Structures are given as C-alpha cells and as structure tokens.
Amino acid sequence: MSILRLAALACACVAIAFAVPVATFAAEGKPGAEGKEAEFKLPPFPADKTIKQSTTIAGRKIDYNATVGSLPVLDDKGKKIAEVMFFAYTVPGKDRPVTFALNGGPGASSVYLNLGALGPKRVQFGAEGNSPSDPATPIDNPGSWLDFTDLVFIDPVGTGFSRALVDEDVAKKKFYSTQADIEYLSRIIYDWLVKNERLESRKYLVGESYGGFRGPRITHYLQTRLGIAMNGLVLVSPYLDPEASDNGDLSPLPWMLTLPSIAAANLERHGKLSDAAMKQIVDYTRTDYVTDLLKGRSDPQALERIVNRVTELSGLDPEFVRRSGGRLETQAFLREVFRKEGKLGSRYDSNVTAWDPFPFSPRQRTNDPILDGIIAPTTTAMVDFITRTVGWKFDGRYNALSYEVNRAWDRDSKESDKGSVDALRQAVAIDSKLQVLIVHGWADLSCPFMASVLIVDQMPVMGDPQRVQVKSYAGGHMFYSRPDSQEHLRNDAMRVYAAH
C-alpha cells in the first residue's frame, strides 16, 4: 500500500506512497581519518523457521508451510550489507506457481498485502469503523490466493525487521533510491528462487502503491538483467507516473485524475455506486470537463458549466466548488466533505473518517485517518505471528510503516520522476505472453484509478488487448478491506493465472 507522498508522503499517482522508519543501527564506531568502516554490533537474525498451518479457502481446507526467514544483500565485493526478511507460504505439490508481493512507500513493509489481501490469514483494518484497539487476532482469509499460488512477501530494507548493516549514508546510496531499490529487490527474488529450487516455476509479481511503481521496473530488470521472466504482474492501487499530477495551473490532467474518485465516493455515500454510473462520470471527465477546463476565460459559460456539474458529482456546497473553480484539491476536499460532522476523510478512501482534532485550523494538522489507524493492528498481529506462532525470536523493532525510510529516500534523481510506464511498455513488448492486471478502488485519491485508465489507453495494443487490463472496485486504496471487493480481486487474479 503506499502511504506518504513520494515527494512528501508516499503513494500517490497524485504523489503519495507508503512510508515508515529505517532500521535502527547500533554502531560502536564511525569511519575515522583512516577510512575504517563503522563496526555494527547487531544481534544476528535467527535461522529460517517453518511451521505447518492450515486455512480454509472457497470451502476447501488448505494445508501449508509458513516460513519466516531472511536473505542477505551482498555488495560487489561479497560483503553482507543488509538482511531482508521474507514470509513464504507454500503448499506441497508439483507445478505450483510462486507469487512475490511488495508494498510501497517507500517505507512500507509487506504486512498490508500479507494480512489484508493475499495471505492465508487476515486481520481487519482500513475500513470505516475499524479501530486501532480492535482485536488483532488473525482469522482465515477467504480472499487468499494460496489455493492457486505459493506466496512470498518481501519486506524491503528498513521495513519490518529488514535492516541495513552499513551506516546511514551508505544505506541511502545502496537502498534508498529508485534504481538501487529495484536492483537489490530483484536480486532478492532471484536468490529466493535459486535457494528454494523454484527457477522452473511459473512466476508472478504483485506490487501495491509504490510497490506498483516497483512492479514494472522489477519485471523489466529481471527480464533483461537477471534472466528471470515473470508470467504475470498484478499492480494494486499502483503509483505509476509521478508527473501526471503536476502543473495544475495549466494542465487539466491533475483535476481529471481525482474528480472521478471524488464522484465515486459521493455515489457510494448515497448507495448509487455502480459500473454504469462510473462509466458516465469517466466519459464526462474525458470530454466536457477537460474541454471546459481548457477553454478558461475564452468561454464565459465554461466555468458555470463546470461548477454546476462538479457540484452535482461531488455533493459539495456549490460555493466551495465555485471558489475552487471546479478544481477540487484533495486535502481541501477531504476537510470539506465531512466538515459538518467535525471529521476528516482519508485520501486513501475518502469515506473512511476520523475526528478532526483541529477543526478550526486553516490547514489539516493531523495525519491521515487510515495511516494512523492501521499501524497498531498490523504490527501487533505480525509481530505475534513471527515471534510466538512461528517462534522466530528477535527483539528488534518491527516497522510496518517507516517514516524514516521515506524521509531518507533520494528524490533528486530523474529516475524517481519519470515513473514506471516506460518499463511497463517494454516488459509487455518483450514478452508477448506476459499478463498485466491493474486494480484500483474507485474512491482512492492517493493513487486514483483514472491515472491507470489513461496510461493504459495510451499504450499500443501489442497483440491481445486483454493482456493489460484495468479493473476498479468499491473502496479506496486498500479496497480489499471490503469482502466484496476482495472477492472481485481474487476472481480477476485467478483469470490472470489461468491464462498460463
């Protein structure tokens, strides 16, 4: 899932991503004049550990092995510079596909896809009415993919228990930049396949939020540099093009991306959300809305038409819409839509709310409702699973979301700005059998579905037009917190896997 802006938080196609803290280092020395490296006195990771568990999916009991383990990251001289944790759920049997899953940020662990969307167990979080103090006891996950693929969840360096074994400056260079991130995570996938003798398995990759930014780039890097071909790629609420939301003073694109998600949330509040209703909104956004935005003052009636239609679609006060020129800035909208109730909406799902502790402030002074609400249940459940259920004993801090990693991220390079659309096109062009499924929640304002719709519509077909699809469901960034939407995701994913 993403969660702070890539330039401020993490996930967005509107510039947001998932964020969290960097692993804590205990160094006994710093590089001296002679250039010696710091000596890190960190307790060693335990050996990989596997237990047997079972779950029920689609009415069928599934027995599986759950493994908590780690893989080293080596520099070009063979020195270990980091340890990356993984969670593997494997079912005995031949010809099983294997799926690797990553969340986003930068700075998010894989716990959200693991305990929310795909794993054999789940904890409820991220929906309206969920509380951080609700019981964090995992239950069988009816939406798990484990009945049709083995699952490997990867925690990037600085998230979960994964950690760098070098000082902060070196860690930033080796792990906290766009290309370095892609290269070491690709190698982790390669190393897991080699270690577990799974190179011949069908292989899939799932990335959520900034993990969706990673997905096409990792796929392309594996294809062209490490010699590993993915069979399928599933991008969940992906952050694909950071520049799409730039220059809203001139370009209509930033407002086109978010208006349909605002309208979807309004329809849902009135029980009217449907594919047919959303098609009409998407059609308006592509035609009359963008045309009137571009006309500006050359047509005195253009603004009036925009205000009338956007007021109708959003359910907002017409004066607020008029003052904004029909261009609804996300954070202003999220404060306005629930102002009478004294609440804030989340940019990850605007119908998930929390009390505004500073309602009279001219700007929002508290963190996003979903971000603050998901840390406790996911951390509690995951740490208990690792240390008690599996018995992988470790005393370090588990970082579900690391704001330190997000702050340390190098955003100065051109690689961080240009997005992953080029890599997506190239990966699809290289492999005519690669299947790509892009999925969104209608009401997600951090990574709006409209961005992916426009991106895919501008891609050449390259054979079967169904090879690259965009699907949207009720809900927001973590739409899988809703059972119906999770079921739709599972069914659509099964069709991707069935293609091979």
Image: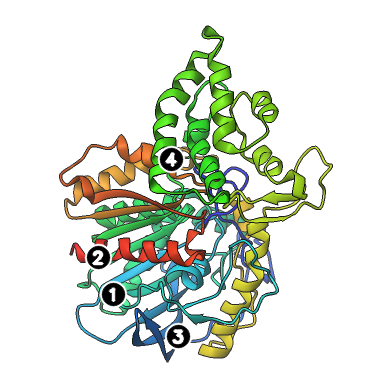
The alpha-carbon separation of the residues under discs 3 and 2 comes to: 29 Å
Task: For marks 3 and 4, give the one nearer the viewer.
Answer: 4
Say what amino acid the circle numbered 2 marks: Tyr
Where is residue 291, by image quadrant?
top left
The furthest residue to the top: 298
Give the residue displayed 23% in from the left and 69% down from the top.
202
Residue 210: x %, y % from top left: 48, 52
In the structure shown, which secondary structural element does the residue marked by tag 1 occupy? loop
Say what amino acid the circle numbered 4 marks: Met
The alpha-carbon separation of the residues under discs 4 and 2 comes to: 25 Å
Q: Are marks 2 and 1 in contact (CB under 8 Å)?
A: yes
Crowd tier of the residue under label 1, counting other residues whose Cα lies within 10 Å: few below 14, some 14–19, many 20 or above: some
The residue tagged 2 is: 497
Image disc number at residue 450: 4
Say what amino acid the circle numbered 1 marks: Phe
In the structure shown, which secondary structural element does the residue marked by tag 3 occupy? loop
Left or right of 133 in this view: 297: left
Nearer to me, 209 or 423:
209
Give the residue displayed 48% in from the left and 53% down from the top.
209
The residue tagged 3 is: 48
The alpha-carbon separation of the residues under discs 4 and 1 comes to: 30 Å
Residue 98: x %, y % from top left: 30, 72
Give the residue displayed 35% in from the left and 72% down from the top.
145
Q: Earlier in the sequence, mark 2 or mark 1?
A: 1
Task: For marks 3 and 1, give the one nearer the viewer.
Answer: 1
In the structure shown, which secondary structural element does the residue marked by tag 4 occupy? helix
- 88 to 77, vertically: above or below: below
The alpha-carbon separation of the residues under discs 3 and 4 comes to: 42 Å
The residue tagged 1 is: 148
